[in-house]
Image (cartoon, rainbow, N blue to C red):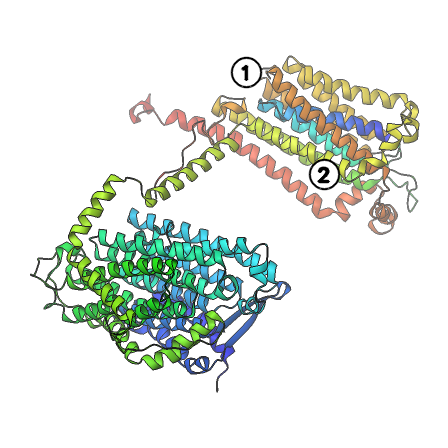
Amino acid sequence: MGYSPETSIILVAIAPFLAAILAPATARFTGAHAGWVLAIVPAAIFVFLLRFLEPVAGGEIVTASLEWAPAYGIALSFLIDGLSLTFALTISGIGALIIIYSGSYLAGHPHQGRFLGFMLAFMGAMLGLVLSDSMVALFTFWELTSVTSFLLIGFDHARQAARRAAIQALVVTNLGGLALLLGALVVQQITGRWELSGVRETGDLLRESPFYGLALVLFLLAAFTKSAQFPLHFWLPNAMEAPTPVSAFLHSATMVQAGVYLLARMTPVLGDTPAWMTILTLFGGVTLLWGAVAAIKQIDLKQMLAQTTIASLGLLVLLIGLGSEAAIAAMIVYFVAHAFYKAGLFLTVGVIDHETGTRDITALGGLMRKMPASFIAAALAAVSMIGLPLTVGYLAKEEMYLALAEADAASLLVLAVLIAGNALLAGVGIAVAARPFTGPTVETPKPAHEGPLALVAGPLVLAVLGIAAALAVGWFGHAILEPAGTAILGLPVESHLTLALNPASVLFWLSVLTWALGVLVFYQLDALRAFLRRLETGFGWTFDKGFDAAMFGLIRLSGAATRFLHHGRLELYLVVFFALFAIALIVPLVSLGGLETLAPAVSLGQWAATGWSWSDLAIYEWAVVALAIIGLVVLVAAQNRLVAIVSLGVQGIAVALLFLLFGAPDLAFTQFMVEILSVVILTLVMTRLKLDERDRRPFEDAMRDGTVAVLCGAGVTLLLSTILTGTLDTRLSDFFLATSVPIAHGHNIVNVILVDYRGFDTLGEISVVMAAGIAILALIRGQRGGRAARQVEPKPAGEEAR
Amino acid sequence: MNYILAALIGVFVAVGVYFLLSRSVIRMLLGVTIFGNAVNLLIFVGGRLTREVAPIVPYGEETIAGAANPLPQALVLTAIVIGFSMFTFLLVLAFRTYQALDADNTDNMRLAEPEDGCRPPLSY
């Protein structure tokens, strides 16, 4: 091959994001044609990816890798095999049609450029997701799809319903995203590989690990949230708040399929165990029936399609759970069929909504003559949805019945579920395609007319592809089904798809049964709907309401926690702070053995061993220590403010004397001055305040504060004592002592340090003093100005003269 | 003598913390001052004590032996001045607060965090 796959694949992963950044500007310059212009990017990616079809069908696997965090062995690695190619072609192909469609659907919208940007960013994330080989990259792109989905659902952010739906989708899918991250870490810990291809090489390692259950639950949670499996399905119908192109692209054809993709991807390493098969079949089956029944209940065309999407996702999960070759083949064909017909139907509904102003199935009818192109698109898509011969939907249905062709009880039960689900879906499909277009013409809010080319092109192309792919069944089996099946199962899969009808086979009659039941559902739709609605009103609780309850409970809980922790009582904050301070001082000293340097002597009562004796201090030194303690004790016990101020001065003077006695005259003089000034200023201020002079602490509070205070004091004493047993690094002091006179020409070494060696530090200190002085001045001035202003303000203008 | 002074510093810290835990703003201010003195002494004693000999080189000599450690002295000198600036600023701030809120008790200063603070919104 004449190209370098490495750079090309990385370009594919990046190009949509670049296009997304340029989208708003493009929309501004090209106006109504923005969709056509921007669709070039996904279309080019689609064409580029087509070139891989032949090599991949021949068994080649294309990889590319960029170093990302080599220290952890994490690379930005991509891999193209049958499975990722099938998904990537779907994403880029449908993406191109959707971008064209969006350009027309939102023509004239003030934020059209933003919308197209979000769409392209989503497409980039989704492409990255399916092309990623590294689990870290997979997780990153997975979360990006959640975020872009959030932005797109909440696009019409002025409406509360849209905001709620966006938050709901984000919360649910991010829950799964976290599970995916944890799952990836578990898998990495077990296998030691970040690359999915590498994990696959480890074979049964995961299945035999004791943490298999944990990994399984985490990956299933991720897939089930993303692919809206029961009981986490409730966010998907609400996501229909988004503009219709979003519903068609994200919430039917691509993003919600990410969970299915993940399950298919993990099948070789997590699949084929009883737990895997039971859980997937059970949840898939329940989701299928739940979605299909819920679809009947709706009258909004978009909601009907959304519910059938849930059902289809359940069906896909069920098929992966069955895990046989035929089931996996059915899953791949059904995925392709579903992407074609569901996106097509959504887009048609969007056209109907756009051109008639309503999408209420009971308020539409007879549009066939006014919107012939849309009718053809809808009819062809519905034919594939029902699974009539000559469509991809038919191939899928034949294949899934084939997967259950065994006669044991479990298979028969699953088969019954499948037939019921398919019949319900077929009924809804007929209704969506037939009801709005046939019958008598009904007045619509806007006079109905056919949509422009950009709107009808997408649905028509998709509908035709749904037939064309089936007609080219040999090529389809060879180029799509076989490589994808091989990628999932890890062994060569052979396509035996055929369009031929075989009336001798029981499978054919199962299909006929499905069609018959589907037609029955269609004719009884109104009766069924009325019945289900009655049933629902009898049962008030829904998963949707449960979500609200959980969210509001969380908000209340966080509010209560905030009020509990953030109570606004300063003394309690400080108690916590100083208690932690004491712990931080004492615990390391005790646990890290700092005390042992002191402890032996102390515990033996040999105080002399610590070098301690009364004569350590001269009598005048003892006097100063006593003075300091007296000052502090009197301060604590002071009953009036003058005593308090004087005793504050006493302890300050004692500190100054200590400095003086231990060779620090500069400190002593400064301290004297500061203490005197403090006492004077404090007296001035305190005498102007009518303060409660005594310490009115309740006894319990005083005990609590006292305990904390004594612990802090003891901690500092122990810390300092421990420090003093060590040796002091005097290099810096020696340097100052030795060089002060020769190079700085100063004899008072402390002064030399302050103004010479550490001159900038002193400059900073002076700045602090100045800033404090200015702030004080501002506070006092502000007070005067404030008072003056307050006095002037209330006066009426006339009174000024008096 | 180091241990005696270490114990004395512990007393300073304890009294300082006890005052800081008060609800009266003025008492907290006293606590700040005492705590500041404690920290200054801590640095001073941490640099080891030497009696009476100040780090001042006599004239005509190059250096001085057996003098007190000058480095902690320089640090503490800066700290004393900045501590004083902070003390005066806090004092004026407390004074203005008392005038504006008519409160010296921190429990009554609830302007920023009202007793019934606003509840989080229960909607989307």
| Classed neighbour count for the residue bearing mark 1: other residues with Cα under 10 Å, few (<14), some (14–19), many (≥20) | few
Marks 2 & 1, CB-CB < 8 Å contact: no
Is residue A76 visible in the rendered image? The answer is: yes
Q: Quadrant of the C terminus of chain A?
A: top left
Q: Is A756 left or right of A163, judged from the image as shown?
A: right
Label 2: chain letter? B
Q: Quadrant of residue A523?
A: bottom left
| Residue situated in front as seen by the camera: A744 or A3 | A3
Q: Position of residue A681 (x, y in %)?
A: 63, 24
Label 1: chain letter? A
Q: Please, what is the three-letter code of the amino acid marked with disc 2?
A: Thr
Q: Which residue in the structure is indicated by mark 1?
A: A690
Spatial CA distance of label 2 from label 1 is 34 Å
Q: Please, what is the three-letter code of the amino acid marked with disc 1?
A: Lys
Q: Position of residue A476 (x, y in %)?
A: 35, 78
Q: Is A632 left or right of A158, judged from the image as shown?
A: right
| Residue situated in front as seen by the camera: A726 or A134 | A134
Q: Position of residue A696 (x, y in %)?
A: 59, 15
Mark 1 lies on a secondary structure that is loop
**Residue that protrudes farthest toward the top in the picture:** A639
Q: Which residue in the structure is indicated by mark 2?
A: B78
Mark 2 lies on a secondary structure that is helix
- Mark identifier at residue A419: none
Vertical comparison of B1 with A435: above or below: above
| Classed neighbour count for the residue bearing mark 2: other residues with Cα under 10 Å, few (<14), some (14–19), many (≥20) | many
